Image (cartoon, rainbow, N blue to C red):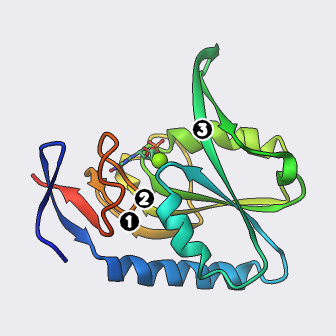
Amino acid sequence: MDSQITVHGKRFVPYISEEEIEHKCFEIAAKINKDYEGQKPLFIAILNGSFVFAADLFRHISIDAEISFIKLASYKGTTSSGNVITAIGLDERVKDRHVIILEDILDTGRTLYQFLPELYNQNPLSLKIATLLTKPSARLFDVQPDYVGFEIPDKFVVGYGLDYDGLGRNIPAIYQLAE
Ligand code: XMP
Ligand code: MG
């Protein structure tokens, strides 16, 4: 693994290697292959950050499965609870499907907490969350991931699809902001 890198003038140090990520994608996929045998799940990957994880994980899925990609857009002030998050690109195939959300990182949980009701409204048979990274100590909203790659501390990371202000998604490994 390379040594430290600079993104937008900030220093990042190596944190999770390509090999560790690859192994974890294989492990998560193996669990899903077992749990969903015969069920033809629908993966929904949330852009932009999850595109690299989704591509790697999905290639280890050996059961029949579909994948779709969505973007989330938030609108302020339309409800008393604040932002409403809605999907761009989601079609109605969610109904009566076993759905697995793919996320790059679960941080405060706000995004999924606000978005999941929209999915539940469309009556999936089941709904689970697979995330490569989770920051349990940063959680402010009650969202529990079902498949987790790595639990990490509340420190900013880039690489493997994750960006710092638009840059860094193409870095093959995960780097952590230096102290
Ligand atoms: P919430 O707080 O809604 O956040 O769970 C999820 C989204 O926030 C972004 N995020 C990060 N992006 N490094 C990043 O590059 C990080 O350490 C980080 N933490 C949160 C990310 O877009 C994620 O989908
Ligand atoms: Mg994201």
Give the numbered dot on residue 72: 3
Q: Amino acid at mark 2?
A: Thr
Q: Residues within 10 Å of mark 3 (few under 14, many from 20)?
A: some
Task: Please name the residue shown 23% across and 68% down the image.
Answer: 15
Comparing 162 with 95, the one in front is: 162
Give the residue at mark 1.
151
Q: What residue lies at 50% left-to-right and 44% top-to-bottom? A: 109
Q: Is residue 149 above or below residue 61?
A: above
Three-letter amino acid code at the position of disc 1: Glu
The residue carrying mark 2 is 134
Q: Three-letter amino acid code at disc 3?
A: Leu
Q: Earlier in the sequence, mark 1 or mark 2?
A: 2
In front of the other: 144 or 33: 33
Q: Is residue 21 left or right of residue 157?
A: right
Q: Are the residues at dot 1 and dot 2 in contact (C-beta closer than 8 Å)?
A: yes
Q: Residue at x 45, y 79 (%)?
A: 24
User: Is the shortest distance between ligand 1 and the CB of mark 2 under 8 Å?
Assistant: no
Marks 1 and 2 sit apart, C-alpha to C-alpha, by: 5 Å
Please say if 81 is above or below 40: above
Secondary structure under the numbered disc 1 in the rendered image: strand
